[in-house]
Image (cartoon, rainbow, N blue to C red):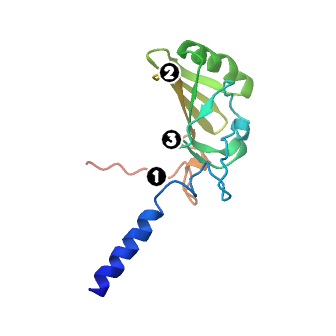
Amino acid sequence: MKALAAAVILIALGMTGCTGSPMSPNSRSDGGTVQPSFSLFSDIPVPAGASMDMERSLLLGTGDLWTGRLVFSTNNGHGRVFDFYKTEMPGFGWQEITSVRASISIQTWKRGPRVATIQIRDSLFSTEVILTMAPMEGTASAMPSGMSSSAPVSVRPL
C-alpha cells in the first residue's frame, strides 16, 4: 500500500514538471516573457516582421555553426517570401542548389559544409517558413568523431 502511494506521488510530481509555465523556452525565472530574437542568426536573412514559432523550432549551436529547424510566420505573401530568399540568400554567401515554386515551395542552398532547406507554405492567416539547417553529408562535421569520409561502406540486404 505504501509503495502504491509513493508511486502515485512520484507520478503526480513528474506530471507537474510537464507543464509549460515556469520552464518553457519563452519564459524567464522571474515570470517575465522572453521574446524570441532573430538576431542570433547572422548567416541567414529573415523577413522583417517575422514571428518565430518557439514550440516547433529546434535550434542547436550558435553563430554560423547552428543546426536544426527554425519555424516562423510572416504576413508577406508566399510569392514575396519565395522571391525574398532567392534574392537575399546569395548576399549571405549561399549558393542555390535547387528550388521549386508550388503550393508548398522548397529551396535548397549550400554554404561551406552546411545545407539550408527552406519550405514556404500558406497557413491560415500568414505564410509559414520552415528553415532546416544541417551539415552537408560527407563533411567532417556530419561524421561521428573518429570516422573519416573515406570510411568503408557496408551494404546489406534488408
Q: Callout 2 environment at 10 Å: few (<14), some (14 to 19), or many (20+)?
A: few
The relative height of residue 37 versus residue 15 in the rendered view (above or below) is above
Q: Amino acid at mark 1?
A: Pro
Q: Is residue 100 left or right of residue 89?
A: left
- Cα separation, mark 3 vs mark 1, equals 36 Å
Q: Is residue 78 left or right of residue 61?
A: left
Between label 2 and label 3, give the one nearer the viewer: 2
x and y percentages locating residue 70 in the rendered image: 57, 37
Between label 1 and label 2, give the one nearer the viewer: 2
x and y percentages locating residue 118 in the rendered image: 55, 28
Q: Residue furthest bottom?
A: 2
The relative height of residue 120 versus residue 141 in the rendered view (above or below) is above
Q: Are marks 1 and 2 in contact (CB under 8 Å)?
A: no
Q: Is residue 22 left or right of residue 12?
A: right
> Which is more toward the observer, 134 or 155?
134
The secondary structure type at the circle numbered 1 is: loop
Look at mark 3 in the image and give the residue it sits on: 56
Residue found at x 62% / y 38%: 114
Q: Amino acid at mark 2?
A: Phe
Question: Residue 66: which quarter of the image?
Answer: top right
Residue found at x 67% / y 42%: 35
